Image (cartoon, rainbow, N blue to C red):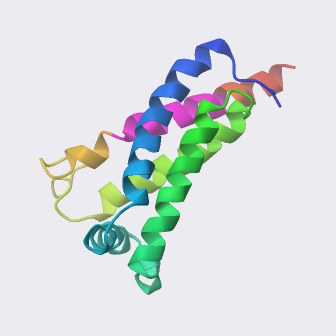
Amino acid sequence: MKIFARAHQLPPRLAAAAVILNSGVDLVDADEQRAASTHGMAAGAYPFLRRMDPELFTRLLARSEVALGAALLAPFVPSLLAGAALTGFAAGLIGLYLRTPGMHHEGSVRPTQQGIGVVKDVWLLGIGLGLVVEELRDRRQH
């Protein structure tokens, strides 16, 4: 496993980190209404989350986003690990998009106006998968 991120991996890691850190820091001080809204959207897509307290869910989500953003920023965090975490996070966002009615046109993955804010995060999935694939490919070549 690589100890340091490679120079060409830093720009996508930094771009993803900036967006995710901003989102996490934004959620840290979420009030009760924002927590309920954030939780409601997530629980609508992932029903097992309904049992979770909205404020606890939002606090955990905020901390997870801050931790992921920090891991992406830290060049000593191996790209395979950072990429795998980013891929999982982004897959959850895309799942939210696909499972939430009204975010995409019926029978299509094309976003509605309401879904553009979430589906645009597909680039996070691309960055995460790119990091993972590159690291796995390089392991096979050595």
Mark count: 0
Residue positioned most to the right: 142
Asked which quadrant contains residue 100, the reply is bottom left
Rendering coords of residue 6 (x, y %): 69, 17
Asked which quadrant contains residue 95, the reply is bottom left
User: Does the magenta-highlighted stretch encompass residue 80?
Assistant: no
Does residue 37 lie above or below 15 as drawn?
below
Residue positioned most to the bottom: 51
Question: In screen coordinates, is 91 left or right of 118?
Answer: right
The quadrant in which the N terminus is found is top right
Rendering coords of residue 64 (x, y %): 55, 56
Question: What residue lies at 12% left-to-right and 47% top-to-bottom?
Answer: 113
Q: Is residue 2 visible?
A: yes
Does residue 42 lie above or below 116 as drawn?
below
User: Does the magenta-highlighted stretch encompass residue 125?
Assistant: yes
Residue positioned most to the top: 7
Does residue 66 lie above or below 49 as drawn?
above
Q: Which residues are magenta?
A: 121-133
Magenta-drawn stretch, dominant element (helix, strand or loop): helix
Q: Is residue 110 visible?
A: no
Asked which quadrant contains residue 50, the reply is bottom left
Question: What residue lies at 54% left-to-right and 57% top-to-bottom?
Answer: 63
The quadrant in which the C terminus is found is top right
Does residue 61 lie above or below 65 as drawn?
below
Question: In screen coordinates, is 92 left or right of 142?
Answer: left
Rendering coords of residue 2 (x, y %): 80, 26
Rendering coords of residue 33 (x, y %): 25, 72
Question: What residue lies at 62% left-to-right and 30% top-to-bottom?
Answer: 131
